[in-house]
Amino acid sequence: MLNLKQEQKLKQKLSPQQIQYIKLLQLNTLDLEQRIKDEMEANPLLEEGLTEEEREEEEGLTEEERLEDEREHELDAETESEVEIDEDEEFDWEDLLNSSEDLYGYKANVDGGGGGEDDDREKPMRATSTIAEDLRDQLTFSNLSEEDELIADQIIGSIDEDGYLRRPIESIIDDVLFNHGTELDEDDVERVLRQIQQLDPIGIAARDLQECLLLQLEHLPEDTTGRGVAMEMLREHYEAFTMKHFGKLAKRLGVSDAELKEAFDLVKQRLDPKPGEGSFTAQENYITPDFTVRWVDGEFVILLNGRNAPKLHISKQYRQMLEELSAEQKKRKKENGQSGATPAADDTPDVAGTGASSAAEPGENSAPGNAPTGGGPPTQGGVDEETRDFLKDKFDSARWFINSINQRRHTMTMVMDAIVQEQEAFFKQGPGNLKPMILEDIAEIIEMDISTVSRVVNGKYVQTEWGVYELKYFFSEGLETESGEEVSNKEVKAILQQIVDDEDKTSPLSDSKLADRLSERGFKIARRTVSKYRKQLSIPVARLRKQIVVEEENGEEEGE
């Protein structure tokens, strides 16, 4: 049985402006710069830089007045929620805001359909050739046969990002047979593989680390110090080499500690364990600080990167066009009201000049092209309905975008100010003075949600007097010392790193001994916690930190 009932529900839903603001908030400086360029390309009403009035006013200011004006502009922008409009201008804001369609704005993206484009947008990358392309270019001078070219292409296509060929020879033979119908044997593939391994970078297409290092050693001059010992060590005693059993290696190779050290130094300093690392991935990351914090005359000065706070405004030309349309619309409404004639069955006012009651008197000031066109759509000031909707929607979009940029700048400044307030000792005195702090602490100070703070912190950097730090660096959990004082776990990690750097390299400290050393300094930390911190700091286990120490007349020389 069908029932018809009325039900009232309260639902919370993000507005298009809020969605746009959230997306902008999580962008870093470079991504925001690209986002603004994209928006300006898509919206002709949006312009960057000073308006004509602001430019003329700035030209007449002195340097001190200009700096003061910039400070006032920063403060005004933080609380600005509307686009700057001349006080004496007339505009039908209600009609503009109540636009029934949003064909070109952001409303169409609220419920999905491409909403993740901003998140997935990649940073601009410079044009570079991949290592696979470089290898193929080098092979053009090798005079390979057609069959060998098929093998070489299959091998190069199988090289991974580190520069290794990890596919079995049998798989390459099967691929060539399946794709080209050419039968091969392992000797053919091995022969072509050896040719590829002679190309630059040396060591490319090796099947394991041992082969990679040996290929590079073979290309070094024969008189290179430590080359002979290193080659024998890698060929005959590779397992002892990886385990750093220095005593066994010296005995088996019949060399002194100094000679063994020379071999280890050669492997460590001259050879590349990953000859293709980074070459297969074209994207490079550059850090552009979003903030600058300085201690000047007894107070902190926090500056937001200029590219984070561009001066955007609505095009004067399009603004005047909209003003003319609005003025003409109001005039027509007034004339229709006086004559008693009302357009029937048309929600959009007829401003085309059709109808006797609304005909403009000769000599009246009107926009160019105001004459009606027979048989065409209703026009207003020479502009058809579709163009009017386009202008209104683009005006909405531009206004929302400018407001979102200003709101983003205000939120980011508030978060950075709160971080400096909480980590004052660090910004004054540098590393070693970081205190425990979590996202919730900042959220409570600025009275915003934790998710907002998280978006601001993610991927943002600050330039300090002690270097460039990611904002995430200032957030850490706390550890209580024996004296009851709470310190950041990042400070404990820094102390752990110092202990490892100062340890006896002939007998590195185990995790248990590292925990004892930390306990001596007042930090009660379990061995498993030390192990976790050590891994986070990319410090190898004690066995792999062992080094050879050779006594000399002028002191000690350490090496691996």
Image (cartoon, rainbow, N blue to C red):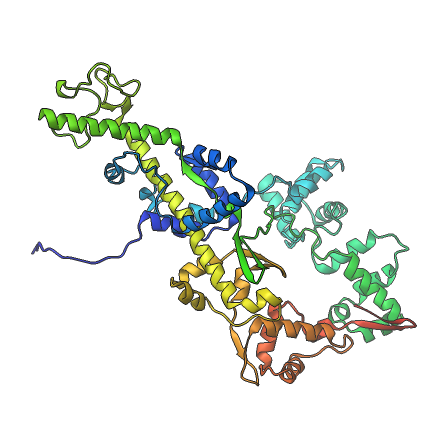
Q: Residue at x 73, y 74 (%)?
A: 502
Picture coordinates of residue 273 (x, y %)? 72, 57
Q: Would residue 522 be found to the left or right of residue 47 on screen?
A: right
Q: Would residue 459 be found to the left or right of residue 112 on screen?
A: right
- Frontmost residue, 349 versus 503: 349
Quadrant into which the N terminus falls: bottom left
Does residue 462 appear anywhere in the picture?
yes
Q: Residue at x 48, y 49 (%)?
A: 71
Picture coordinates of residue 98 (x, y %)? 24, 40
Q: How many marks?
A: 0
- Frontmost residue, 512 versus 185: 512
Picture coordinates of residue 331 (x, y %)? 20, 27
Q: Quadrant of residue 102?
A: top left
Quadrant into which the C terminus falls: bottom right
Image height of 465 relative to 396, above or below: below
Q: Would residue 15 be found to the left or right of residue 262 on screen?
A: left
Image height of 483 relative to 217, above or below: below
Does residue 31 appear anywhere in the picture?
no
- Frontmost residue, 551 versus 291: 291
Image height of 389 relative to 421, above or below: above
Q: Quadrant of residue 400?
A: top left
Picture coordinates of residue 477 (x, y %)? 51, 72
